[in-house]
Amino acid sequence: SPSQHAAVPQALAADRQVLDELTRFDDEYKELQSVVRDLPQKVRHQIMVPFTDVAFFPGRLVHSNELLVLLGSDLYAERSAAQTLDLIARRRDTLREKIGGARAGVDAMDSRAAAMDAVRAADSGGEGYSLGGITEVGDG
């Protein structure tokens, strides 16, 4: 039906958007892993401290092995860099599972869209349409 033909591209676009967002989250976690891995290498770090959206001032980051980590909606805990890296690794593992599921959903929706396009072409009398090379063979 025409409504199904319109719904498939919309669902495919939504699935791709979810996949892109999950991939972006994984990229951010990967960058965070790198920062957390490097922090304890020095006792102090010179940084630019944000004061407003556009104003910064020089400062120092101390106690670089002590991190405040979000555990839940409003629950934070102080963790070491090593503990934080373990937490990030577990979160990335979960995220990669979700990415795999989202990728499978996009692939399935792509296949469905292609099948619907093929059916639409057959219904409209499109030439060159093939049902996978199925031919009828006579006895004689």
Image: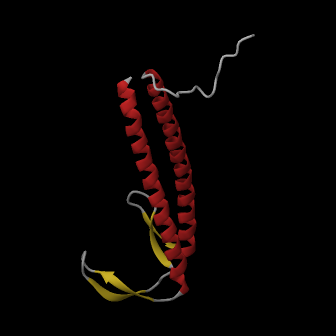
In terms of image quadrants, where is residue 75?
A: bottom left
Give how far across and how far down residue 102 sits, in percent: 50, 46
Give how far across and how far down residue 103 sits, in percent: 52, 47
Q: Nearer the viewer, residue 72 or 126?
A: 126
Which residue is depicted at the point 55% across and 55% down? Answer: 96
Left or right: 47, with 37 as reference point = left
Q: Nearer the viewer, residue 67 or 12?
A: 12
Q: Residue furthest right?
A: 140
Give how far across and how far down residue 11 sits, in percent: 40, 38
Q: Nearer the viewer, residue 25 or 43?
A: 25
Which residue is depicted at the point 58% across and 66% down? Answer: 86
Give how far across and how far down residue 115 sits, in percent: 51, 31
Which corner quadrant holds the N terminus?
top left
Which corner quadrant holds the C terminus?
top right
Which residue is depicted at the point 56% across and 51% down? Answer: 97
Q: Nearer the viewer, residue 40 or 123?
A: 123
Left or right: 77, with 53 as reference point = right
Above or below: residue 106 compared with residue 95: above
- What colouring method underlies this structural image? secondary structure
Above or below: residue 97 compared with residue 62: above
Left or right: 25, with 138 as reference point = left
Q: Residue furthest top?
A: 140
Q: How many marks?
A: 0
Which residue is depicted at the point 55% across and 43% down? Answer: 104
Above or below: residue 9 compared with residue 54: above
